[in-house]
Amino acid sequence: MSDRRADFPALLAELKPECDALIAQYEQPRSALLPIIHLFQSREGYTSPEAMRAAAAMLDLTPAVVESTVSFYTLFFRRPVGKYVLQVCRGLSCSISGANDIMAYFREKLGIGHLQTTQDGLFSYEEVECLAACDKPACMQVNLEFVYSLTPAIVDEMIAAMRAGTYATAPMAQTDAPGKTWQVDQNDEVSTGGKSKGARDVSDPDNAGGLGDKAGVIMLDRIVDRDFAFRGRTSERVVLEEPAQIKELVNEDAHH
């Protein structure tokens, strides 16, 4: 397997004219982001960090904006996957038509579970929500190509053909060896609605604050205690260094 990072400048030069053509189709260049990411993934097998940075530069976006978009869509892979991505439907129609048995059979045959890749890098396996082929359950997709009316015999034939290199659906590109999973874990604090570590225990009223920020609470109490109503919006901010200073103002108000 080649050094993808060393090869990426050549790939970028090759795909740049096609990227420019995609950008020209839209009034807003940013609208070309998804097609450009699809293009890079079709050649690399996943959406590499280099591809995201290149897309950001071409569209005048920050890398963070590009990555947040890529991470939203499940069909963009931020880590390498197998040459055959096997996605078995677990929707209602498929479930009542034997999909649970088919999924168990896949797991047994491949020796892997949901969101995992075989050690040889050939298969990535995923159990997905409804694929909208409810008239032909149980169904799945292989590299986004449908396979209908699944049975253990069809699964055996499919896996054998893929291993032999004779399966009708072409394998995906694979420029990096995949790991055991392509799943990217969420930051625990972000996923649970918490604050990042950098925003904890701050006391500056101009900072959004974290778990230890009492300034905002004190300021709110002061506003609530005042005997007047707001008459309009204001862009002014109270700038005080420590909550103690706000507390002193509240105490002064209480004495007047």
Image: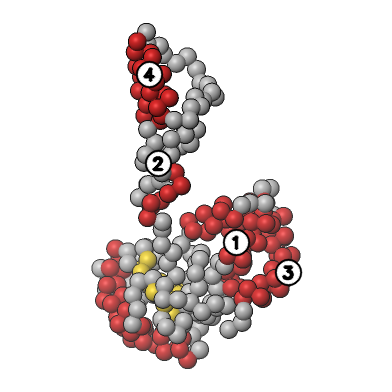
- The Cα–Cα distance between marks 3 and 1, rounded to whole angstroms, is 15 Å
**Amino acid at the residue labelled 2:** Asp
Determine whether the residue tagged by mark 4 lies in a helix, strand or loop: helix
Q: Nearer the viewer, residue 45 or 60?
A: 60
Mark 3 vs mark 4, foreground winner is: 4
- The Cα–Cα distance between marks 2 and 1, rounded to whole angstroms, is 34 Å
Residue 13: mark? 3
**Amino acid at the residue labelled 1:** Met
**Amino acid at the residue labelled 3:** Ala
Q: Pointer 2: what residue? A: 201
Mark 3 vs mark 2, foreground winner is: 2
Of the two numbered discs 3 and 2 on the same chain, state the one appearing first in sequence: 3
Residue 52: mark? 1
Q: Pointer 4: what residue? A: 250
Residue 100 appearing in the image? yes
* In the rendered image, the vertical position of residue 60 relative to residue 153, given as above or below: above
**Amino acid at the residue labelled 4:** Val
Residue 40: mark? none
- The Cα–Cα distance between marks 1 and 4, rounded to whole angstroms, is 50 Å
Of the two numbered discs 3 and 4 on the same chain, state the one appearing first in sequence: 3
Determine whether the residue tagged by mark 1 lies in a helix, strand or loop: helix
Q: Along the horizontal axis of the image, is 38 left or right of 127?
A: right
The percent coordinates of residue 146 (x first, y second) are: 44, 73
Of the two numbered discs 2 and 1 on the same chain, state the one appearing first in sequence: 1
In the displayed orientation, state which residue is furthest to the top: 256
Of the two numbered discs 2 and 4 on the same chain, state the one appearing first in sequence: 2
Asked whether the residues under the numbered discs 3 and 2 touch, taking CB atoms below 8 Å apart as contact, a structural biologist would say no
Residue 147 appearing in the image? no
- The Cα–Cα distance between marks 3 and 2, rounded to whole angstroms, is 47 Å
